[in-house]
Amino acid sequence: MAVALVAILALSTQSLARAAPQAPGAQPYGLVGFSANGLPGSSIAERTANYQRLYDAGVRAIRIDLPWIEIQPPGQGGRFDFSQTDREISAIRAAGLKLIGILDYGNPDYSALGHVVALSPLGGGIPPFGVGSAQYFPPDRPADFARYARATAQHYANDAIAWEVWNEENEGYRFWEPHEDPAAYARLLCATYSQVRAVSPGVPVLFGGVFFPGVAGLPGLSGPQFVARAYAAQPGLRDCYDALAYHPYAYPFTSPELDVQLRGSVLSAADQMRNVLRANHDQAKPLWITEVGWPTQLGYGVSETKQAQYVARMEAATFSQGIAVLNWYTYGDGSDPTGPINQEDRFGFFAPDNSPKPAFRALSTFAKVFAGTHFVADHSRQLGLPTGSIDLGGRAFALEYQRPGASITALWLASESLLEGQGPLANGGTFTPSRLVVRLPVSSPSVTLIDYLGSSRMVAAQEGTITVTISDSPQYLADSASPVLRAPRRACPGRAVTVRLPRRWGRAVLVREVRAGRRLLRFHRIRGNSVRVSLLGLRGETVRLRVIARIGRGRRSRTTILRRSYRLCHGR
């Protein structure tokens, strides 16, 4: 591994060192959460160790069900029993993680329909998904659910970073029997909100994560449709929750960037959800992704390599969209003998034997490389990268993140089409190029290129630029001198350009020299804090200037460097 990468990871490791978990949005690029389905271990110590693996990979929250039927067991006279959930949360707490607590689902003691179903032979629902289970029937009175939610929020007030009210309630055939009901859900959410906030102040309450796309041939409403109808049914809904959760799964399991007719993409789901909020004058509400993932099934899903690529690409793209939280589904695979029928058995980042899949390595690499960074800019258009097309893909990305003293730019080409990247189909590149050569300006004499699984190499700059071949495997360009890309200013060869010096430098500035690469340029000071630099004889598409100046007087003076980029306009 290159020396430069060692330095990067050393800084990153310090940033990931054990500390008090932070609130959503306080993480540099966002907060990564995880669903814990499939996490092995029979003892608290074993489960804590597995949760610790997630913490060490940059995860800071666990999204976990806190089922009403476990906490207020049916037939027990309404008493509260936290013994089952306490055991699991003690392991999560010991690993330094926080909770995204899902307040779900129904309880046969408080639902007339649920009670009838519970007494039938199908009380547990139809396997493998439990469709029609008695617990998925909502309560007859929202106040009963709110009472359970209040008791749960109070019990775990010190552990939670969010309370999510129900899960995928827009898919009524699964989780809100006998069918979805936006108005009824809105009433339940509003009844619950004040009760939870009263005992867990400062912890956001989430509109339960809606399953995003409407799947052809299945009942239910798409996420945007359901949320829009909930607003229409409950005019005061904006005051009943703090953040909107959604689950932008890609069915079929296409790449996160691919726009599919009628459905859109995993990434464009954010725009569609924000459009609903905007239409209801509630656009300030933050978005959380509380579930997303890709199953690794060759018959119906993606390869393990594709899963890992999509994890890296999804993290880089999602946090550039301003999404506060990205929660992955899920920890581990199961061993369901029904195989391809139960796709949920293969979403894990770990195999059934608890060995990590490549996706976990991609997750860990992203956390280490991007530790301490904030998203700065999308340079895809500036670099002239392709925007892709509906159903065929081909979109390329250059997303810059920064931390003090360094810039990290994520680069990749999403070459998968609607007929690629899933099951036994081709990986991509059939309908659009599978590789693309990109030329980028850099500030350092050499930079580090890190692939999404952590391998790295040094690349020497040539006249302030490097050339990179990008593909479906993301690469991270680490430039430790300064931000990688700036919007170049325009100037014409054979003329001069005015470089404005920062106002913070004050008047006591002595410009020592101006260079373009190794070449010294002629310059002279003009009015104010500006110098006029001659570009006579310079060639190429872009020129990068270094203005070396002395600031201050006497012992308090110091030497500093100002960097500027200009795109030369030949023939003008």
Image: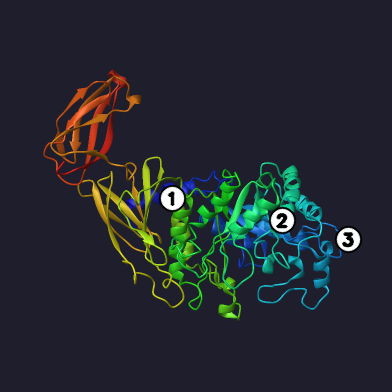
In the displayed structure, 360 sits above or below 302; it is: above
Q: Quadrant of residue 303?
A: bottom left
Location of residue 469 in the rendering, given as x and y in whole percent from the top left corner: 29, 60
Give amino acid for label 1: Phe
In the displayed structure, 537 sits above or below 32; it is: above
Please tell me which of labels 2 and 1 falls first in the chain. 2
Quadrant including the C terminus:
top left
Q: In the shown orientation, is residue 292 left or right of residue 463? A: right
Measure the C-alpha gap from mark 2 to mark 1: 42 Å
| Disc 1 packing (10 Å; few <14; some 14–19; many ≥20) | many
Q: In the shown orientation, is residue 108 left or right of residue 22? A: right
Location of residue 363 in the rendering, given as x and y in whole percent from the top left corner: 48, 59
Residue at image point 86% right, 65% down: 75
Location of residue 316 in the rendering, given as x and y in whole percent from the top left corner: 44, 54
Q: Which residue bears the numbered disc 2?
A: 183
Give amino acid for label 2: Ala
| Disc 2 packing (10 Å; few <14; some 14–19; many ≥20) | some
Location of residue 390 in the rendering, given as x and y in whole percent from the top left corner: 41, 64
Disc 3 to disc 2: CB gap under 8 Å: no
Q: Which residue bears the numbered disc 3?
A: 77
Query: Please, which residue is most extreme toward the left here?
Result: 537
Element type at marker 1? Answer: helix
